Each structure stands twice: as structure tokens, then as C-alpha cells.
Image (cartoon, rainbow, N blue to C red):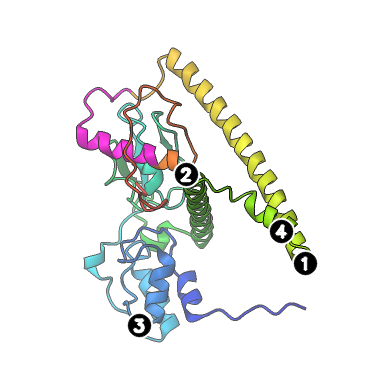
Amino acid sequence: MTATPAKTLADQIEDRLPQTQCTKCGYPACRPYAEAIAAGEANYNQCPPGGQEGVVRLASLLGKPVVALNPDNGVERPRPLAIIDENLCIGCTLCLQACPVDAIVGAAKQMHTIIPELCTGCDLCVPPCPVDCIAMVPVTGEKTGWDAWSQQEANAARERHDFRQARLARERDAAEARKAARMAGASGANPSTEPRARLNTEPNESVDSKTAQAATTADDDAQAKKRAIIQAAMDRARQKKEEMAKLGVGPKNTDAVSPEVQAQIDAAEARRRRLGMTHPDNDKSSTPAIDPDREPGNDNKT
């Protein structure tokens, strides 16, 4: 029988937060806010999406008095839904990077759209949009706070947020590995073969060393297969993009893009190239992007 570990105070606080991941509390996500409350570093009335009912839930858990929602963090309101005006969208992808729950679908230089069922109404996609094509539209009538949101929706939003964070971590690790490989290649080293050569020259090779060598070979094969799959998907996407272009379907608001906006788009393109999500030769018409050397996930914006 497997024992279930007892939940910490931070766990219990997090369970009572709406998981919109909106950062209005002053923290980058719901979990850091929960940890700050548990540590006595933040007050329990800083979550506008949870509203006054959210304050009551936390006060009950903490054994503290019910206080008013802190207006410095925002106001309780009907839950909004992000809507993208697709005729104005220029396909810069900054909103995709901003969405904490992957509720936006789109690709570079293609129109984006919101998946209504996944949007938490966090507002984070609005500020980075360079052409102001995203509106937040109330969709819950007079219902606000937890009356406009369910525990089931909160749990689903937390799962999507955690999955996205794990994906960004994998992308970051992959980018660092590629950077290390490039640096090793520039110096004339071959990290994939030299360790194996050393192992084979040792007269008394251990079982652990043999196991490590086999694991390395298997990992190399898996990575090669993954790269092939990604390349095939990119080829299909490029072919689809060309077909859509022939039909005249694509972003229409691209004639008067300012240098500042183009710089944002170039930075996003550079990040995709760094993560292996595209290739500099894929779009000959693009302005060469300057790599801002940002960490994946820190751009977070459309």
C-alpha cells in the first residue's frame, strides 16, 4: 500500500486559487503566490480572479479574518475571454508566448485564434500584441470571481500551465545542449564519439561504463529520430503555408509594421530558430533576426 504524502500549507492554498495564472497577485503564477502566503510574505487578498469568495476560502484555511480584496491588485469582475481580430493579426506569435495555458493556436506569419474552452481570461496576451488586435470580452454576465469559474476549470488550467512549464524546460535544456554541441564542434571536439573512444581503450571497463555507453547510443538514436519527425512536420507546415499563400490566405495587416514591432517579431523568430522550431533558410523573405539571447519562456508574449 502506497502512502499518500500529506499536503503542505502551500499545496492547500494553491488548491483554493483559481489557477488563471494571471500574475495580478504580484507573483509569476498561482503556485509562487501560494508559497508566498504560506511563508507569510504575501497577504491572502491579492487574487482578483478569485474575488471576495477567494478571500473567504483562504481566510478559512488560514484561520484569519475575512478582509476586502486589495484594490492594488485589481477588481473582481466577470470572467473575460480573449478574442483575436484575425484580419488585424500579423502572425508575430508574441501572444502564443504570453499565454500561460497554451490557449492560443497559430504559427509564425499565420493568423492566430483563441481556444475559448482553454482561455482563463488572464489578460497576459493583450499588452505584447504589437497591433492591438486582442480584446477581452466578458462572457459570464453578472457572475464574478468563483461564481464565474469552477473548481474543475481551475484544475484543468493548472494542469495545462504545469504541462507548458515542463515543455518550456525541455526546450530550454534542448537549446542548451545544441549550444554546447555547436561550441564543441567549433573547437574541433566530438562529444558524441570521444567519450566512447576513451571507454574502449580502458582495459578493465566496468559494467556501469558499458551501460552508460549503451544508454548514450540509444539516446543519440532517439534524438535523431525526433529530429527527423520534427523536420518532416516542418516540411509539411511549410508546404501548407505555401498553399495558403497561393490562395491569398494569411495575415493582412503587415504593410505598416514599425521598426519597433519588427524588432519584436525578429526576436521571436530568433528564439524559434534557437529552439530548432524553424530554420533560417525556411523563409528567405524574412529580415534576419538578431538573437537576443533570451531564455525560452521569458518572452511569453504576441
The residues bearing labels 3 and 4 have C-alpha atoms spaced at a distance of: 53 Å
Mark 3 or 4, which is nearer the eye?
4
**What label sits on residue 186 in the rendered view?**
2
The residues bearing labels 2 and 3 have C-alpha atoms spaced at a distance of: 50 Å
Identify the residue at image location x=36%, y=43%: 95
Q: Position of residue 41 (x, y in %)?
A: 33, 79
User: Can you identify the residue that label 1 sits on?
Assistant: 206
State the residue in front, 22 or 246: 246
| Classed neighbour count for the residue bearing mark 2: other residues with Cα under 10 Å, few (<14), some (14–19), many (≥20) | few
Residue 66 sits above or below residue 174 on the image: below
Residue 130 sits above or below residue 39 on the image: above
| Classed neighbour count for the residue bearing mark 3: other residues with Cα under 10 Å, few (<14), some (14–19), many (≥20) | few
Which circle's residue, 3 or 4, is located before the other in the chain? Answer: 3
Q: Position of residue 260 (x, y in %)?
A: 21, 37
The C terminus lies in quadrant: top left
The residues bearing labels 4 and 2 have C-alpha atoms spaced at a distance of: 24 Å
Question: For numbered disc 4, what is the local secondary structure?
Answer: helix
Q: Quick check: 8 left or right of 127?
A: right
Range of the magenta residues? 252-270
Which circle's residue, 4 or 1, is located before the other in the chain? Answer: 4
User: Can you identify the residue that label 4 sits on?
Assistant: 199
Is 287 colored magenta in this rendering?
A: no
User: Can you identify the residue that label 3 sits on?
Assistant: 40
The residues bearing labels 4 and 1 have C-alpha atoms spaced at a distance of: 9 Å
Which circle's residue, 1 or 3, is located before the other in the chain? Answer: 3
